[in-house]
Amino acid sequence: MHMKNKIAWFLTIFLCLNAHFVGAQGKRSMSTKEYIDSFHEFAMQEMRNHGVPASITLGQGILESASGNSRLSKECNNHFGIKCRREWKGRFCLADDDAKDECFRGYESAYESYRDHSLFLKNSRRYDFLFELKPLDYKGWAHGLRKAGYATNPAYGNILTRIIEKYSLAHYDSIVVLGKEIFEKGPSEVLKVNGIPAVAAKAGDSPESIAKEQKLAKWKIYKYNDLEKNDLINPGEILYLKPKRKSADESIHIIKRGETLHDVSQMYAIKMKYLRKLNQLKKGEEPVIGEEISLSQKRNAPPKVVKGKVPMSTAVKVLHSASRSNDQTHEVLSGETIESIAEKYKTSVLNLVRWNDLEYAEVKPGQVLVLAPGIKSSADVRSVSKEEVVLRPNTHTVMRGETVYSIARMYKMSPSQIVEYNDNLRNGGNLLADQTIWLVPKDKTGETQKASIHFVKPGETLFSISKKYQITVDALKSINKLSSNTIWVGQKIRIP
């Protein structure tokens, strides 16, 4: 072949491949930061309604939709790679995964994908144990999903954890559990626990700043709260302004995953030295999960204790987690191209496109790519119209700053429908933060209506929660199988 013909032939092949990968002008990929900014409100809403940590939902969305750049997410609004299964009646998309032309669920909007992700986990018995974890235990969720068979990749839990820590996604869990006001500066409201005055730390607070605000010597904050010098405090953490007591009105506390003796001490306002005495524990010893800790009477024998490394105190400390490296994912840096990344990891552009389910062979700084198969579905996706079904939850928990109009837009409804379905709005009432409103007529909710979840915030009592949701204290205790009126910050309370 003549040299000029060879050049023309190679140029033609290159242009064809480039057109196949890059596609139409004007299309661009979404960075991970843009993805988080676009969808964190959906993830928080789902955590309020169904209890799946927002960090887990966002992390899985980033990982499984290539930060919203996969064809499955773009063409079918499927951000989590959920397959159809026999019970699925809505739109669907065909994609090559474990086999050719497998059926994946298709949605009218990204929100519907987020909601279906929550229901998929909530309605499957294999994931039941995850909903018993503390709401801020994102590591337990990440590794638990892998253990329950959500993903086949043995490194899935580590990869998901890395993404959550890299982008501080646990921050959104803390906002849901503790309330947005905890992260906003302003005068701290004094509350009482076991009769002892206390405040909830806000974002940026330190023992010194709390002491200055409350006009106390800083050593008192350290002493009253059993803190060591240079200990960090986190938003929502309870800090006492007077010495804690020797015992509590409650008799026992059962240790949950991630809790330490210091957590129990702060929860019930009992001094650490007296808590150790009551339970015959030496300094540094920590009880294992499931052990009963006495809060008022001395035990005859100490509880079983953790051997080896003691777990990190208070789950809110996830806000200080450090990033880790993991060679199964790559975050795109400024100036990198998909070709340079393929060369760096000794793979092909086609592999990166396929493994990340990309529509175009282009990447953007901040985008997370997986470097091995078996985590996402493939790129060969086509949408198929079956029976058009609009998914919509029965209720919505109002977030601060939302309006009837903004909620109506989210669910593709008219504002007048929302007003019609809610008695208080129909009678001229206003929306309130944390209020649960109906998105369907009450007589059409059926038996599938799921209870919403309320996360206990600093200063709340069972009585104040019962007033907020217009339900009796006894009913709340019965639904949540509570033996007393004692609740603690971060506890999940089911609301019918």
Image: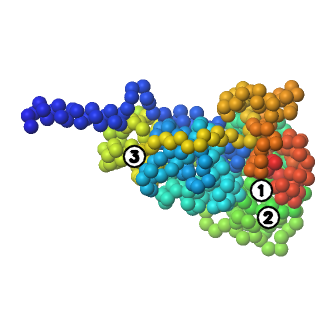
Residue nearer the viewer, 322 or 246: 322
Rate crowding at label 3 as few (under 14), some (14 to 19) or many (20 or more) other CA atoms within 10 Å: many
How far apart are the two marked residues, 1 and 2, measured between alpha carbons? 9 Å
Residue 394 in the image: state x and y as whole percent. Answer: 74, 42
Q: At 54% from the left edge and 45% from the top edge, which residue is drawn?
A: 92
The three-letter code of the residue at mark 3 reads Arg
Q: Look at mark 1 in the image and give the residue it sits on.
A: 264
Colouring style = rainbow
The reply to whether discs 1 and 2 touch (Cβ–Cβ < 8 Å) is yes
Proximity of marks 3 and 1: CB atoms separated by less than 8 Å: no
Residue 256, placed above or below residue 441: below
Residue appearing at x 83%, y 52% in the figure: 487
**Label 1 element class:** helix
The spot of residue 296 in percent (x, y) is 88, 62
Q: Which mark is residue 312?
A: none
Q: Nearer the viewer, mark 3 or mark 1?
A: 3
- Neighbour tally class for label 2: few under 14, some 14-19, many 20 plus, Cα within 10 Å: many
Question: What residue is shown with label 3?
Answer: 354
User: Which residue of the protein is positioned furthest toward the bottom in this rendering?
Assistant: 300
**Residue 211: quarter of image:** top right
| 350 on left or right of 259 | left
Quickly name the residue at label 2. 293
Distance CA(mark 2)–CA(mark 3)? 52 Å
- As measured in the structure, the alpha-carbon distance from the residue carrying label 3 to the one carrying label 1 is 49 Å
Residue 209: where, in percent of width, then height?
73, 36
User: Mark 1 or mark 3, which is nearer the start of the sequence?
Assistant: 1
Quadrant into which the N terminus falls:
top left
Tell me which label, 1 or 2, sits earlier in the chain: 1
